[in-house]
Image (tube, rainbow, N blue to C red):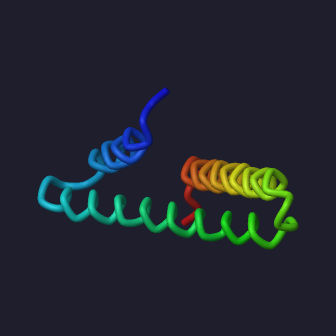
């Protein structure tokens, strides 16, 4: 299993092929910032779902609901990325 930092490094490495050498530092910092904001937002939303979706004595149910929220977010991300890839492969209409 890969450590969590390898995913951030992979996304930064993929983006560096499309950016000139002059702007690679700025691009890497923007990607890292977006990854950190996404993690913080996701944890906040998952914590809220965990807290307010189950009674206090049903801790496992809150974890279960937060897991489903994460799975739905991941599926939504995959669908959005597939849509954008599909859009770039369509012939351009002038």
Q: Residue at x 57, y 49 (%)?
A: 85
Residue 33: quarter of image: bottom left
> In the shown orientation, is residue 57 left or right of residue 93?
right
Q: Position of residue 6 (x, y in %)?
A: 38, 38
Residue ranking furthest to the left: 22
Q: Position of residue 78 (x, y in %)?
A: 65, 48
> In the shown orientation, is residue 50 left or right of residue 41?
right
Residue ranking furthest to the front: 57
Residue 9: quarter of image: top left
Q: Residue at x 33, y 49 (%)?
A: 12
Is residue 55 shown above or below 60?
below
* Number of numbered discs overlaid on the protein picture: 0
Q: Position of residue 16 (x, y in %)?
A: 27, 48
Q: Residue at x 75, y 64 (%)?
A: 50
Q: Which residue is more in the foreground, 55 or 22?
A: 55
Q: Residue at x 38, y 43 (%)?
A: 5
Residue 2: quarter of image: top left
Q: Which residue is more in the foreground, 31 or 61?
A: 61
Residue ranking furthest to the top: 1
> In the shown orientation, is residue 1 left or right of residue 48?
left
Q: Position of residue 74 (x, y in %)?
A: 66, 51
The quarter of the rendered structure image containing the C terminus is bottom right
């Amino acid at each position: 299993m890969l450590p969590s930092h390898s995913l951030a490094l992979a996304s930064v490495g993929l983006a560096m092929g499309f950016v000139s050498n002059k702007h690679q530092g700025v691009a890497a910092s923007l990607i890292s910032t977006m990854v950190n904001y996404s993690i913080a937002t996701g944890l906040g939303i998952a914590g809220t779902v965990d807290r307010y979706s189950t009674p206090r004595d049903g801790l496992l149910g809150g974890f279960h609901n937060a897991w489903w929220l994460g799975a739905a977010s991941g599926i939504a991300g995959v669908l959005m990325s597939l849509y954008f890839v599909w859009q770039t492969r369509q012939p351009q209409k002038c």
